[in-house]
Image (cartoon, rainbow, N blue to C red):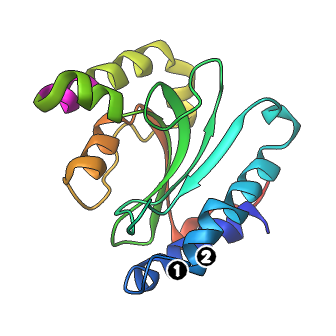
Amino acid sequence: MALRDTLEAVLREYDSAKLTTFADNPLAAFIRKEAVLDLERAAGPAAAGLLFAGSAGEENWADVPWLAAFDPVVTDSATRGYYVVYLFHISEPIVHLSLNQGTTVVREEFGAAARQVLSERAAFVRDRLPDFVLRLPATQIALGSTARLPGDYAAGHALGITYSLDNLPREQ
């Protein structure tokens, strides 16, 4: 499936899927498997060596599902390092393409100060990528919640683009 169609499917179906049982849910399986393959295909040959993953949650529905690409030189996990990720808004048909950072390790190390550390690190990255800020102008994102993970993801965002269901880009 084209990546645009994959993003559209998650944007359209996630809210209603969250009202159903998580175990063996087809949309959760789609996000973990087919959507990850769609992201990898869309990245093309330039993505050789990258790792791809997606999550709708582990044992329960995640507030914010995601699809990510990891450079193993930097990280191989969403828990640490920097990576590129699609983060889906909790209640609106919005997806953010984000240069973000793993929040779990930061929260374990800094506790209540984690969001401040994440924000400072995001600003540090932004300051060092001025050419990309012009092409990826969203320097702040909202995910519809300030609960721990969504709030940490928002704080960890360095730069990106926000798409609504109505303005998803063409596949090219």
62 and 45: which is toward the camera: 62
Q: Which type of secondary structure does the marked residue at label 1 adopt?
A: helix
Q: Residue at x 58, y 54 (%)?
A: 54
Q: Which mark is residue 12?
A: 1
Q: Which type of secondary structure does the marked residue at label 2 adopt?
A: helix
Residue 119 seen in the figure = no
Q: Residue furthest right?
A: 45
Q: Quadrant of the C terminus?
A: bottom right
Tell me which amino acid carries mark 1: Arg
Q: Position of residue 68 (x, y in %)?
A: 58, 45
Judge left or right: residue 149 versus residue 29. left
Q: Which mark is residue 9?
A: 2
Q: Which residues are magenta?
A: 113-119
Q: Position of residue 144 (x, y in %)?
A: 27, 62
Residue 81 seen in the figure = yes
Quarter where residue 153 is shown: top left
Q: Residue at x 88, y 37 (%)?
A: 45
Marks 1 and 2: CB-CB under 8 Å?
yes
Q: Position of residue 127 (x, y in %)?
A: 41, 15
Disc 1: CA contacts within 10 A as few (<14), some (14-19) or many (>=20): some
